[in-house]
Amino acid sequence: MTTVMLLENVTLQYPIPRRYKKGNIKPSGVRNISLKVKQGEVFGIIGRNGSGKSTLLKMMAGVFPPDSGSIAIRGSVSLLAGVGVGFHKDLTGRENTYLYGALMGRSKEQIDGLIDEIQEFAELEHHFERPIRTYSSGMKARLGISVATSFKPDVLLIDELLGVGDAAFKEKSRAKVRELIDASGSVVIVSHSYTMLKQICDRIMVLDQGGIVCLDSAEKAIEVYQKMLQV
Amino acid sequence: MTQSENIVPLLPLWGKRPIHRLPLIVVGDLIRSRHLLKLLVKRDLSGRYRRAYLGYTWAVLEPLLLAIVYSFIFTILVGSSDPLYPVKIVIGVIGWSLFARSLTTSTKSLSNSINLFQFARVPKTVFATSGTLTNVVLASISLTSILPFYFINDLTISINLLMLPFWLLMLSFTGWGIGLLLAPIACKVPDVHNLINFLVRVGFFLSPVMWTYDMFGRRFGDGWHSVVAHLNPTIIPITGMRDSILGEASAIPHYGYFMCFGIALLGFIFGAIIFERKAHRAVVNI
């Protein structure tokens, strides 16, 4: 299988604020991460809070550069992180969709061709024409997932978002991710829910304190993670 | 092999780029991102006065009201008898606001737009530029407040008016360039925002908003004071705006133009280099 993302010895450490420098505080971030994400693969990342999962995704998205090491990507990449990230509260769902698409490098014509599909999938009906500030968290998240998956990046990075919405929408979101993978895209997903990761991921990486603890098949990695939590 | 494999190679996200090409890379990024720029400007414009009953009328009212207050104070203090003084203040306020807003919006662009570049790889200069272009549009709207003065002061439209867009762009370009230079530093040292706010307040008095180029010339002559004063990059463009609108020709020396264009160009070149080299790492601090 073709490699769509290659990370070699990637390290990034957040600067320690000056007021904490005198204390014995270890810098957080990620260190010496090397991995390959294959085309059509669902790659999971799991770890405790502060283990570096979201930092790693941001580096994969090209938001943060590494202090050392290299990241190479084949095609486009998009990060779906947090409810309403990238949306402007005073713009309508429709206007935000156009803005989000442009941020992902899509032309107006490309967005025109997808707008109905996005509106339908997000189940927003007439709210699509209302400002985002009137939306509930669930509505924002549905729009986020709908927009991010519809633009079909070659690599979609998802940070903790497939658990939003009601049971039916969760199932719909997972189906959409599968659809994306079938369209030869790849997905890297961060979650605390190992049941969900086990269901949808081909491989999982367990992170702890910024380093790789285990990178293996979904079942084996979850086993390692569960043992780690018991310690 | 799949189709995408044939077309798209595996490319490094953070390849090395030679320093001398960085200003050109900034220009290329902005040209490629023009659709996004347009949407961001539209968003900023629609958000600026969205909840105000008077909407964009405020863009016209603000300089007019300021001109009334300043004219009143200045006439009391100095006893100016120039009938064109109020319109000169309106032009000064609009020109200075354009520069100051372009400087502050581009300096704050990284911290204010973090929400927008957290999920895709977007050229970060786009956010500094969209804020600056928004200010150019607002300044252009504000300039309609000059129209009543054409009737009140019986002014005539001269060919000089064609230079007005150029001076507007010069002011915004200079503020934008210096802002690009400061934006990465402001992420690491938030005090820069306070410093800029302070400089903008001081700069208001050091720039030809309440005074004019001729007043300065009469007071200080053409000695070293004049050379030092031209280090302020707003003096020539604001005077240029006044000359364009009022059909006058201020006695600006050649070195004044050289200093003005030189500062603007150096601001852009160094701004583009520092921004492209430091901005990506600086956002980690936010």
Image (cartoon, helix red, strand yellow):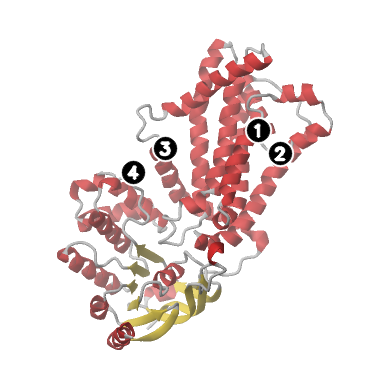
Identity, as a three-letter code, of the amino acid under mark 3: Arg
On the image, numbered disc 1 is attached to which residue? B237
**Given contact means CB atoms under 8 Å apart, are the residues at marks 1 and 2 in contact?**
yes
Task: Mark 3 and mark 1 in contact? Answer it, CB < 8 Å.
Answer: no
For the residues marked 2 and 3, what is the alpha-carbon distance in whole angstroms? 30 Å
Q: On residue B48, which mark appears?
A: 3
Please tell me whether mark 3 sits on a helix, a strand or a loop.
helix
What residue is shown with label 2? B260
* Marks 3/4: CA–CA distance: 10 Å
> On what subunit does the disc labeled 3 rest?
B
**Same subunit, tags 3 and 4:** no
User: Which dot, 4 or 1, sits closer to the camera?
Assistant: 4
**Along the viewing direction, whichever of A62 and B12 lies nearer the viewer:** A62
How crowded pointer 2 is (Cα within 10 Å; few <14, some 14-19, many 20+) is rated as many
What chain letter is assigned to the residue under label 1?
Answer: B
As drawn, the label of residue A90 is 4
Along the polypeptide, which appears first: circle 2 or circle 3?
3
